[in-house]
Amino acid sequence: MNIDLLITMANQIGAFFKSHTDQEKAKEDIANHLTKFWAPPMRNQIKAHVEKEAGKGLELIVIDAIKKHL
């Protein structure tokens, strides 16, 4: 899948959960959403992007969620 599309989708998920008052819970919720609704190849691709490209284009909360919980 196109990494730019995955970045856009992940940032949209992050934006939804970002308003949560507990930011650690928000990160868990982002990762849970990715686990529940993204196919394993999509998750693997976004994780690789965080590892290889430092998550370029992703919001910080999404990067943290992926690093800590995915």
Image (cartoon, helix red, strand yellow):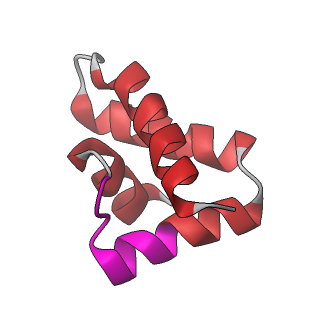
The quadrant where residue 40 appears: bottom right
Q: Position of residue 47 (x, y in %)?
A: 49, 69
The quadrant where residue 36 appears: top right
Q: Identify the residue at image location x=37%, y=70%.
A: 50
Q: Position of residue 11 (x, y in %)?
A: 40, 38
In the depicted structure, whether residue 65 falls above or below residue 30: below
Q: Identify the residue at image location x=36%, y=64%.
A: 67
Q: Identify the residue at image location x=27%, y=43%.
A: 61
Q: Which quadrant is the N terminus positioned in?
A: bottom right
- On the rendered structure, is 67 left or right of 2? left
Q: Position of residue 45 (x, y in %)?
A: 59, 70
Residue 49 colored in magenta in the image: yes
- On the rendered structure, is 37 left or right of 43? right
Can you name the residue that lies furthest to the right here?
39
In the depicted structure, whether residue 66 falls above or below residue 34: below
Residues in magenta, as a range:
47-57
- On the rendered structure, is 47 left or right of 18? right
9, 51: nearer the viewer: 9
